[in-house]
Amino acid sequence: MIVGVPREIYPGERRVALVPAAVPGLAKAGIEVVVEAGAGEAAGYPDDAFRAKGARVLAGRGEVFGAADVVVQVLCHGANDRNGDADLPLLREGQALIGFLRPFGSLGAVEAIAARGVASFSVELMPRITRAQSMDALSSMASIAGYKAVLLAADSLPRFFPMLTTAAGTITPARLLVIGAGVAGLQAIATSRRLGAVTSAYDLRPAAKEQVQSLGARFVELPVEVKDAEDARGYAKAQDEEFYRRQRELLGRVVAESDVVVTTAVVPGKKAPVLVTGEMVAAMAPGSVIVDLAAERGGNCELTRPGEVAQAHGVTIIGLFNLAGTVPYHASQMYARNLSTFLLHLVKEGSLRIDPGDEITRDTLLTRGGEIVQPRVREFFS
Ligand code: NAD
């Protein structure tokens, strides 16, 4: 069986779906890897490094798609809404496609993939079960985004993060607040602590409290009743508007006292809730920084400009997309580990077996035989 790794074509994308270190493990399971020339270059993995581990490097993109039984990408059509459609004619019936497909993004994009007749697997739909943890690309990328969010904040903040006692006086530490202590939020907390900021965090899921405290941060308790905080998959459930209104009211004071706010709060399949209003931004000290990791989903801050860095009331609001892609070496290494574990799970005796009885296969399989087969996605668009 042949797995093909095309170069990523989304403008500015530097990650690659597999790295050389993943090749020998796949070879042991009878999987050959073919890579488009230059695919790993921007992430720090030159063609020779792939060759040295036994991969075949092919010059043409068409050749890679042509040779592959399974195509693996970071951003497939759907997740790549800029030029991902250029790959559609290269896909063929009977082939499999694995990557980020943004299954709840656009029906047109999912239908276009289905129409190619490929069996596509969306890594966003990986079930949150212990068995699938090592295949969970969303978590890998969220963790990198959380780390990078704090570095961006530190870079923009006109203050130090740590407390310093110097001959020129004592510097008080920065105060950083994380709203949404999931995978990205927890990594933001850990990074902020390493840089010496006084760190606190809030999440509506009660389970987050212990995790926040175990990282040495203060958990912010808000006297507001949460109804049914999380679903069976561990994701936060959407709350009613009255809850969000009360939450904003109570968060206002904590936000005003923070030099940096990192927001990560999302609810699957929904626009991100607005947790930081323009009024709350105006109450922050000039020079403060907000990093809105929910920007791609509309943003947790009312003044976020998705995809941009904005200034409002003297506060810098960073709403940049794809922070994981800005750490391409390790993002690719982690993604490659997630994908190769997933591939080894799907491949039996050297070929891809689609077993509808298997939870991981069933949840991630988006299209097959010309149809959208994922029940949650079908329901979402119906
Ligand atoms: P996510 O990216 O969907 O959301 C980020 C965080 O925002 C979550 O913690 C969520 O509770 C929070 N949030 C949503 N609305 C909010 C609001 N109004 N106010 C405050 N916070 C709000 O979530 P995630 O980071 O992917 O992870 C959520 C949970 O799932 C975590 O506990 C994580 O450890 C768990 N998880 C488990 C597995 C697994 O078992 N395989 C894999 C990944 C994540």
Image (spheres, rainbow, N blue to C red):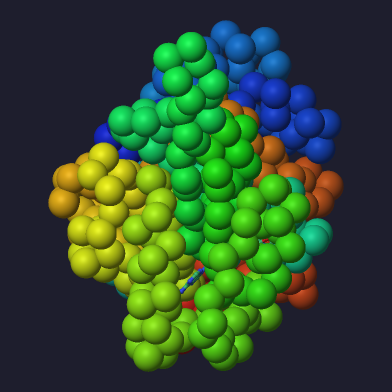
Q: In this view of the protein, which residue sits in the foreground, 185 or 132? A: 185
Residue drawn at 51 percent across, 85 percent down: 224
Q: With 24 as the anchor, is 249 left or right in this view?
A: left
Q: With 55 as the anchor, is 81 left or right in this view?
A: left
Q: Position of residue 270 (x, y in %)?
A: 39, 75
Q: With 216 as the anchor, is 99 left or right in this view?
A: left
Q: In this view of the protein, which residue sits in the foreground, 6 or 196? A: 196
Residue drawn at 57 percent across, 9 percent down: 48
Q: Can you see residue 97?
A: no
> Which image quadrant is residue 323 in?
top left
In the rendered view, tell whether residue 329 sits above or below residue 215.
Answer: above
In the rendered view, tell whether residue 275 sits above or below residue 12.
Answer: below
Q: Can you see residue 211?
A: yes
Q: In this view of the protein, which residue sits in the foreground, 6 or 172? A: 172
Q: Position of residue 327 (x, y in %)?
A: 48, 29
> Which image quadrant is residue 311 in?
top left
Q: Position of residue 72 (x, y in %)?
A: 54, 42
In the rendered view, tell whether residue 177 sits above or below residue 126.
Answer: above
Residue drawn at 57 percent across, 33 percent down: 196
Residue drawn at 38 percent across, 45 percent down: 259
Q: Position of residue 247 (x, y in %)?
A: 42, 78
Number of callouts in the render? Answer: 0
Question: Which image quarter has ligand 1?
Answer: bottom right
Q: In this view of the protein, which residue sits in the foreground, 16 or 275? A: 275
* Quadrant position of the N terminus in the picture: top right
